[in-house]
Image (tube, rainbow, N blue to C red):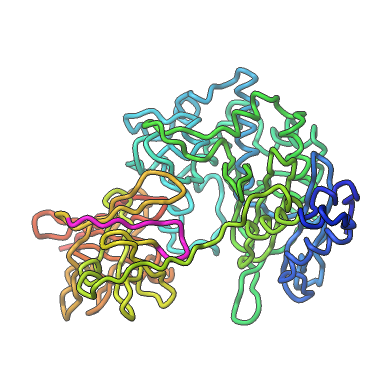
Amino acid sequence: MSRLAAVGVALLVLPAASVAQGRVPSADTTARAVDRVFSAWQSTDGPGCALGVSRNGRVVYEHGYGMANLETGTPITPSSIFHVASVSKQFTATAIMLLARDGKLSLDDDVRKYIPELRDYGTRITIRHLLTHTSGLRDQWSLLALARGRFEEDRITEADVMDIVPRQKALNFTPGGEYLYSNTGYTLAAVIVKRVSGKSLREFADERIFTPLGMARTHFHDDYTMLVPGRTSAYAPRGSGWRVSIPNYDTYGATSLFTTVGDLLKWEANYDTPVVGDRALLDQMQASGRLTAGDSTGYGLGLALGVYRGARLVEHGGADAGYRTIVGRFPEQGLAYAVLCNAATANPTTLARGVADVYLAGALGPRDTTIALQGVTLAPAVLTSRAGVYVQPTTLQILELTLRDGKLVAGRQSSAPALVPVSENRFRLAGQPVEIVFADGPPPRFERRMLGGGPPLVFERREPIVAAAGLLAPYAGQYYSEELESTYRVTASDSLIRLQTGTSTPIDARPMFADTFLSNNYTIQFVRKGREIVGFEVTDGRMRRVRFDRVRAAR
């Protein structure tokens, strides 16, 4: 453990009331306050987190909490190595930017210039689209999970991604038209680095990023079987204990960076005092992308842009298997943080905000609080008229509004949030910055508005169907997807359909409205030719309308 916070730094974290009274906290006081943020992760029989904090480029605190390996009894230390998942993306983006600065490529180049095997969709996809999540490309993890029917058990390689992505016949949307997070873009960016530079992303990043910054314990992990001394294991809950949950990837760019909190703080310092790249390059990475219509995405090049308690922050989180990570900085306050955890139940964003509350206590605005809405009282008939099944026609997200104990709630689960009526047609989603505004149609619909900004989404009500004996039988059969090279068997009961491929865990889906079913992750829409069912399309949050065609029985 290293406690490097000095009294001068402690003065910066002093609450305003204490300053007024002339009390100066010690570095130990600050450390104890930070340690309390991680109190849930300090056991010797569970996983935990590593923390690193710097002020103006100088490390002020590093500490490990919990265990790096539950089988060997190894504790987490600041030098423990973690798989940091999507934190990787900013380094892939930096590699592309360095090649652009070298004159080897342009962010506005057509991706097919470097990856000609990618399908021509009749509209240009640029490297910039890849890095800003505006390409429209379906997400690789969603595609592979659906193709295999499972995820964790199978090793995933770059070759797997480069096999399935070019087979996709459609995009989620026209490039530049929407922002939708897609890991595919960053895997393709890594391929571009290799084809342009003649070096793998691992080799290129070692030479141009990690070695110049002295990030000696950092690398892109491109060999799943490679031994990595000091690596943490990762865990997910099982009953009252834990099970091992480690990514099995040999694909990188979107993920697979191995690093430590100390190395990440060196990277964060580079944004303020560039050693790798220059001010123009780093500023471009931290500028929000723009959609074709001019809307800001709130995402730069491998970096998410936000605000916490009135202070601007630039950061990125990651989640793969049992790893949960975040690294970022408050540029105006000179505070950088890295929180790396090896437990699927950890919330590094909340932990990082707790650290910021300690170090920036006098420099932040009021805490975000959820104001308890008093609401208005509506007649039961009004609430009943709002209940029903609604679908967003573009994303195919389904939201079911139901009545429970005289309240309108979003979903069937016992934990479903309530809609608090503000007026007869306006509701606030309890505990969330979301407003629902109803219109009576036709068809009846509502707008979901994010109070923090962003375009509204319109949901339209559909007439629900009620499952009955024999109603779902026509959907049973075999269906094949050319895009996935996968066959699913569909069986039907009186209340739901079940989809399964190979030995995978079945997907159970219940009917919502005409030809449309909902499972936990997927919206499944069956396609008809006339009255005959000829196929179905599968959609999730990062993959839209993947087609399966019905397989005709041999005669």
Q: Residue furthest top?
A: 103
In this rendered view, identify the residue nearer to me: 495 or 440: 440
Queried whether the magenta region covers residue 427, the answer comes back as no
Residue 47's spot in the image, x, y percent? 72, 69
Q: Residue furthest front?
A: 21
Quarter of the image where one finds residue 203? top right
The magenta-colored residue range is 429-440
Q: Please report the residue visible at 63 percent of the width from the left and 82 percent of the height from the top.
A: 240
Quarter of the image where one finds residue 398? bottom left
Give the left or right position of residue 368, taking residue 524 as reference: right
Q: Please report the residue visible at 35 percent of the width from the left and 74 percent of the height from the top.
A: 412
Question: Does residue 522 appear in this view?
Answer: yes
Queried whether the magenta region covers residue 438, the answer comes back as yes
Tell me the quarter of the image containing the N terminus: bottom right
Give the left or right position of residue 70, taking residue 176 as reference: right
Question: Does residue 250 appear in this view?
Answer: no
In this rendered view, identify the residue nearer to me: 326 or 332: 332
Quarter of the image where one finds residue 448? bottom left
